[in-house]
Image (spheres, rainbow, N blue to C red):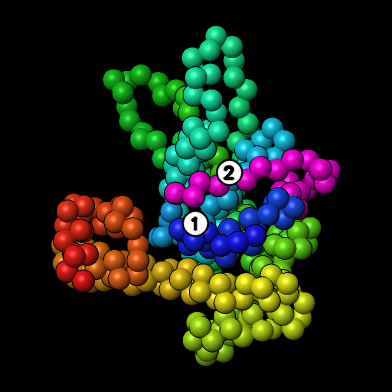
Amino acid sequence: MGTNTKYKDSVFTFLFNDPDKLRELYCAIEGVNLPADIPIKINTLNDVLFMGQLNDVSFLIGDKLIVLIEHQSTINPNVALRLFMYAGRVYEKTIDKKGIYSTKLIPIPRPEFYVLYNGTAPYPDEGIVKLSDMFTKSDFFGLPEKSPALDLEVRIININHGHNEEIVKRCKTLRWYSVFVSKVREYQKEGMNLEESIKQAIKYCIEHDILKDFLEEHGTEVENMLLTEWNLEDAKEVWREEGREEGREEGLLNTARNAITEGASLEFIQKITGLDIKIIKNLKSEQ
């Protein structure tokens, strides 16, 4: 297992970039026991970024396509749309395009979507987000509204301490990862800054045989990844607040400047600000 040199992995994607760990995780989520030799093929899209990070994991297990996302902030209400677009890219990547025009039915893997929630805001043990919840509601010339011809369902699972303990118990890697994140937050509450909290959490986990081999081999990488992840989450909150407090236009410009400084992609900055891409490029050239 190695780091992706072109893109920045999240700690979650880096840790679970392993067929055995993904098999264990899927069995824990679904409460099933699958044979150790059931094939797993990881097909995570390496060019799909969120805040400059790879935080999606997709893989084939048997005849199913599984897409996982970890959230360390509040649940994004648009996550179903994001996963819908992601799944289309995965199918496009893995299916023979010529076969689409065949007279024979092409069997495709059945999709399942999960968000593992690890944020600090309160959230129930589980929740469901549907793509159809985003569809506009309108009275179209008085015609009765039909059931949506397209939908996608995302199962959101809270993996914080005290939630879904049976799932966490069944997957040792997920359990230890949850403990590691919890220790970082514990040290922060004690007054340590983020960098020191991560260092102390890594030290604690190694001493207590929690992800020991992983952290001994990749401790520095994990520290850098988590610093990037959590600093970006904090930055997003600051940017939102600045946008509310300042005039709309100037607030959006400052949001873009801050995002550029933090290394966010131009496309992502355009998405969160709505600014013209030329304006964002000009702001970047000024720095």
In the picture shown, does residue 44 fall above or below 107?
below
Question: Is residue 185 something that shows in the picture?
Answer: no
Give the quarter of the figure containing the C terminus: bottom left
Q: Residue furthest bottom?
A: 191
Q: Where is residue 136 drawn, in percent x and y?
A: 35, 35
Q: Residue at x 18, y 65 (%)?
A: 285
Q: Which residues are magenta?
A: 23-48
121 or 277, which is in the foreground?
Answer: 277
Question: Is residue 234 something that shows in the picture?
Answer: yes
Q: Residue at x 72, y 80 (%)?
A: 206
In the picture shown, does residue 118 fall above or below 23?
below
Q: Where is residue 62 drawn, in percent x and y?
A: 72, 35
179 or 283, which is in the foreground?
Answer: 283
Q: Where is residue 254 drawn, in percent x and y?
A: 22, 69
Q: Where is residue 221 drawn, in percent x and y?
A: 56, 72
| Figure quadrant of residue 106 | top right
Q: Secondary structure at mark 1?
A: strand
Residue underneath mark 2: 43
Mark 2, other Cα within 10 Å: few <14 / some 14–19 / many ≥20: some
Residue 54 — which label?
Answer: 1
| Figure quadrant of residue 168 | bottom right
Residue 46 colored in magenta in the image: yes
Q: Which three-letter amino acid code belongs to the residue tagged 2?
A: Asn
Q: Residue at x 55, y 39 (%)?
A: 153
> Would residue 165 appear left or right of 10 to someone viewing this image?
right
Q: Which three-letter amino acid code belongs to the residue tagged 1?
A: Leu
